[in-house]
Every structure is written in C-alpha cells, then in structure tokens.
Image: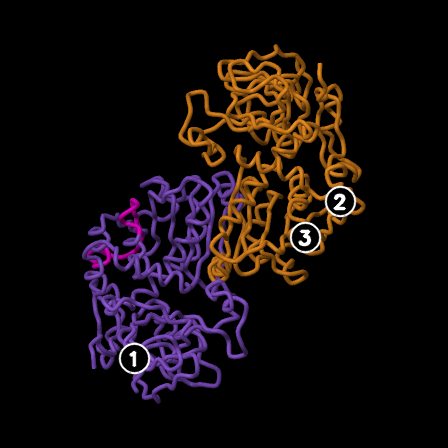
Chain colours: A orange, B purple
Amino acid sequence: MHAIGIERGKTGPRLLELPRPEPAPGEALVRTLRVGVDGTDHEVVEGGHGGFPAGEDHLVLGHEAVGVVVEPNDTDLAAGDVVAPTVRRPPPDGSNTYFERGEADMASPEAILERGIDGAHGFMSEYFTSPEEYLVSVPAELAALGFLLEPLSVSEKALELAAAARSTVTWGPDTALVLGNGSLGLLTAAMLADEATVYCLGRTDRPHASIDLLEALGATYVDSRETPVPEFAAAHEPVELVYEATGHAKHAFECIDALAPGGVAALLGVPGDWTFEVNGGRLHRELVMGNRALVGSVNSGPRHFRAAVDRLRTLPDGFVDDYVTDVVPYESFERAFADGDGGTVIKTAVEFDTHEER
Amino acid sequence: MHAIGIERGKTGPRLLELPRPEPAPGEALVRTLRVGVDGTDHEVVEGGHGGFPAGEDHLVLGHEAVGVVVEPNDTDLAAGDVVAPTVRRPPPDGSNTYFERGEADMASPEAILERGIDGAHGFMSEYFTSPEEYLVSVPAELAALGFLLEPLSVSEKALELAAAARSTVTWGPDTALVLGNGSLGLLTAAMLADEATVYCLGRTDRPHASIDLLEALGATYVDSRETPVPEFAAAHEPVELVYEATGHAKHAFECIDALAPGGVAALLGVPGDWTFEVNGGRLHRELVMGNRALVGSVNSGPRHFRAAVDRLRTLPDGFVDDYVTDVVPYESFERAFADGDGGTVIKTAVEFDTHEER
C-alpha cells in the first residue's frame, strides 16, 4: 500500500510503498479516508519533534485521521464503521497505569509513543490497524470531516481543564483571547464564538483567509505587531480565558496580564529552551492577588474525541467550509504540506479514499 | 475600649483607646475573644502592605478573629453566639458584583477593603461590629481555637481551587510539598498529613518547634539551603501538589520542576517586584507536556470558613496544642508580635476575653 512518511537521511515527506498491515488480536484493520496536516506534522518533517519507531528508518506521518473499518477481526466493531483513532500508545515494553485507566493523555511524554509523531507509525497510509480501545466511533455523516476530531479533541481537553479550574466560582468565559491564528487557534475561536466575545492574536498581514474567517465568526483579529500581549488588556479588555496556541514562550508569562481577576490561561504550545528576564515578583503577585490560573494541556483522550463529535455538529454555520481550504489526493500530498500560502491556506488534509460503499 | 493598632507616623503596634463601636442596621456587636497574629500583620506593622482607613490616622490590626455576639441588634444572630468574621468588605462607595454573589474573595484587590489590613479597621479590639453576612457561626466548644478559622479557610480555598483544577482526572494528592514552614505552611501540612506524604521546605536551623511539629505529623522537613526547590524532585520525589506560602517569587517558577505530570501548584505568597532570568521556554514546555497547573489563591469566603470549622475538628491529635505556642493577654500584645523567637514560637494570638458567661 501507499503511505506518506519521512525516511532517515532524506528530507521532506515522501511517498512510501509498504506492506498492508495485519491486525493483531484485539485490533481492527481500517481503510483510511482523510488525514489532516498540522503544525506538529511540519515539525516532525523538519526533524524538530518526535522520532522514528525503534529499529526502523522510516515513520509514517499523520495523527489526525478518520477511516472505515474493513476487517473488524475479533473486535466488537463492524465492517463499515467510521472511526477516528486517538494518538497515544503504550511503549513496547508494556502498558502503564495511565493507559489502564483511560488517561494516556495525562501521562509523562517519556512514558508513551505517539502515532505519526514519536516512535510509532501514523495514519497517513491507505490502511492502518489499531486496538479497538483507541478507535472512537464517528457518525457516518461526519466521515468527511472526521479528520477534524483530533484537533477539536485537543481543544476540548484544554477547555475542559480550564473550566474545571474555575468550577468552584462564577466564570464564563464571556471573554476569550486566543493566542495564535493558526489552524488550532482558529478552530478554538470557532468553538468559543457562540458563547464569548473572542479576540484572536496573530502576526499575519491582511488579506489572509484566517483573518476573514475570524471576522466572519464575529471575532476580533489582534495584530501582535501593533498590540503585543502585554498591551492587550489596556487596548481591549481583560479576558476570563486565554488559549495559548503559539508556542511562543513569553506568551505563557505575558498572558497573565491579559487575564481578568479569576481568569485562567490554557497553555498548549511546546517551545524550545529560551532564557529571558521576567518580573517574576509581579507575575507571581498577579497570579495570587487576582486568583488567576495557568493550566498546561497536551493531547486528548477518548472522552474528548466524543465531545468533539458533538462539537463538530454545532460549530457556527459555514465555518468548516471556509476552514478546510484544501483536501488533496494522497498522490499530490506535497500540496498539503506546502508552506508560503499566499494568504489562502488555513487547514489541509490528505485524502486516501472517499466514504463510499465498495 | 482598648484596641491594638498602628498610628500614622509612629512605629510598631500600640495600645489604642477608642470608643466602643455602635452596630449599624444589619450589624451585630461582637465581644472579641482571641485574634491570631500572622505574617500579614507583621507586614502591615512594618508598612509594607495595606493602609489606613480613608481619612483616619490609625488602623486597628487583626484579621484572624473569634468573638461572642453581645448585641444581635436587628440580625438573626443571638446573644452568646460564637462567630468568626470574614475579612473582605465592600468599598465605601458601595457594593460590587463579587460581594452580591458571595465571592468577595475572587474580587480584584483594588475593589475591596480588608479589615485589619487595608482600608478598614480590624478585630484586635475589645469589641467589633460586622454585618451578619460576614459572620460565620462557630460551635461554642471551638471558641478558644476560632482564631484559627481564618488561616484554615485560606488554605481550604487554595486546596479547593487546586483540587478543582484536577477534578477531571485521577489525582490525589498522595504527595505534597509545602513551601514555607511558617504558621500557614505548618497548618496546611497538618491539613494534608492524613491523606498525603508531606514534605515541608524551610530555611530554619534545628532545633525549632516548627520542625519538631512537622516530624510529629510524619512530614519530612526539607532545608532549602541543602535542597533548593529545583533539586527537590530528584532528592525526594515529584509531587502531585505544591502549596507555596513563602512569597519568594522564584518559587512560583521553580515549583514546576517539583511537580509530577498532572500536578498542580497552589500559589499564596505575595512578593514585591523582582526581575530575574528564567528558562521560560523550558518552563512553558514542562507545564504543557506534563499537564501541570499553577493556581493563584488569596483570601477566602464563608464556604471556606465553614469547611475550616469541620477541619478544625479533624486535625491530627495533639497538633493544635503544639501549634499554638502563645496566647497573650491583650495588655501584653507586644509579646505576640515579637520576632526572634529562639526556635520556640509557631503561632501566637492576642486574648481579649475568655468564653465564659457573664
């Protein structure tokens, strides 16, 4: 079968020819429909994140997938079921307590593999196998958009953690600042748009499809080159929620000044080392005296995928049509990974097959 | 009546002669039993925190009080009821939404007064008045220890916020690191000792009553001069909960390294400005990849006082006897504020009266 992956010693994503996988006991064989591309994929391709499976010289890419069960094997799934796989898997030397209780997303990153990212093949291939417990059911009518469930689930988890941190007090969020107008930031802005006044910060020149889409949502685009995060609250208003999806390390500290008393910031970016000065006394004091909170969040679990299914049905009308800017046949995968978009690209996916009966 | 307070232009706490207050409509008159002394009182005395009521040249100290209702006035209280007052009050120009919904502890510090601390007289006087809504009922048999309810309530709130932040996932805390072996740190160590393995960090030479008390609780004293916070996890173990009560600004950042994946730090210290370098990229990444959280917490509300009443009944046997090292008749108040304790002082209180029928 064909797959899209990276190979040791070679640059860029490549078309690979691999044997079709055989499902082990407890696993189903899934025919891949679509696989989304995100910033993590670009980091993996560039070698800045993740790694090859042990003893192998290639890694199949892709962690935002939807597919159709073709061989249920000994699972309780049925042929034709549409499913989306979760990303984390136990290490080869066995399980661990986080997997046993269904909370792999809370495990230390050293204790897990991530399909398509770190140590385990992804889903960007004509077929993949997975244990049943890591396959979330997707309603058939959402099959074409099922590749959005993984990124939606990542935000579902982060917003769940943020709301939990405020669950003992009165809290909206009525106002939210999303840091980053990339694909995850935009998706989260859409998730929040019906309930909150949403600001989204970026450093993108107009015209850009992401800014048009934000404004169609009723959100306000904030250019960080004109209004950096430390000046946001004075220029606009302090917010009850910050959602950080830039990976710009200073944002984790600067966002404290954007928060209203009782506000919470969900941090999702993964920066590299960077040493800089902070007024740590003032930041510490603002956290305490304002009852503010910072909540880190990574990955997601089956519960968040199920919440994402509900969310996918209730995103603002027309949002998804404008959000998914390109779906590319897998033979043309390079287009889905292209940079330098000319202001028209938001979210791309690679298509291996359509959801049609055979 | 007599009161203990500070006066503009004079140093140290002083014995004041003031008129006995008259309860306004909705207020009760309370005869003070005991008032605890804590680090905030010392900061107020030294002029580093808080301020005088508008237009006045003195401030009655004391925010950790218990007393007996002597004039219920038009409230639903009865003469003889034992009560503990909460600390925050609306500003003179009227109420605000936080008070209206019973969440004054979540308000911006600019929007409130604090009795005995900032802009409103405290309780360190033979009598005080308070609106009924800010008086929490105390069982008569706890009257002598009721001055511990305010500091207990501060930790109840912080631990409630920390637990809420972890309420969507499996979390103990089975392991806890308390930063600071002052009176609030020790009280919190006692609150946690029955359910968690507790470490408490300080920089106090042995012998010291606080270290003896920690060890009597089964907790481990960690000398920060030998094991600073960044080295704590390697020397002992990563913990599920950090409780910061030092006000040392670097602790708010260093504690991230003491947290296990999924851990949460409750921050309570109030440092002044201090600019220093951090590896902000690494700290941001550790928050995200480890699903760690930082939760600021200040003050407390009636719910936390009520939880503190239950907690006071269930603290480890013998703890309170060793914890309250001095109760001083108010005429000798200077002893309760003395520094340089020779290793024997943990928690002091000023006594105005005993809980006896008159």
Mark 3 closeness class: few <14, some 14–19, many ≥20 residues within 10 Å: many
Q: Amino acid at mark 1?
A: Arg
Q: Which mark, by number, is residue B31?
A: 1
**Within the image, what quadrant is residue A299 found in?**
top right
Position of B261 with respect to B215 (left or right) is right
> Picture coordinates of residue A138 (x, y %)?
62, 29
Q: Chain of mark 3?
A: A
Q: Quadrant of the C terminus of chain A?
A: top right
> Picture coordinates of residue A341 (x, y %)?
77, 36
**Within the image, what quadrant is residue B31 found in?**
bottom left
Residue drawn at x 74%, y 30% is A338
Mark 2 closeness class: few <14, some 14–19, many ≥20 residues within 10 Å: many
Contact check, label 3 and label 1, Cβ < 8 Å: no
Disc 2 is placed on an element classified as helix
Q: Which region shows up in magenta?
A: B192-211
Q: CA distance from mark 2 to mark 3?
A: 13 Å
Q: Amino acid at mark 3?
A: Tyr
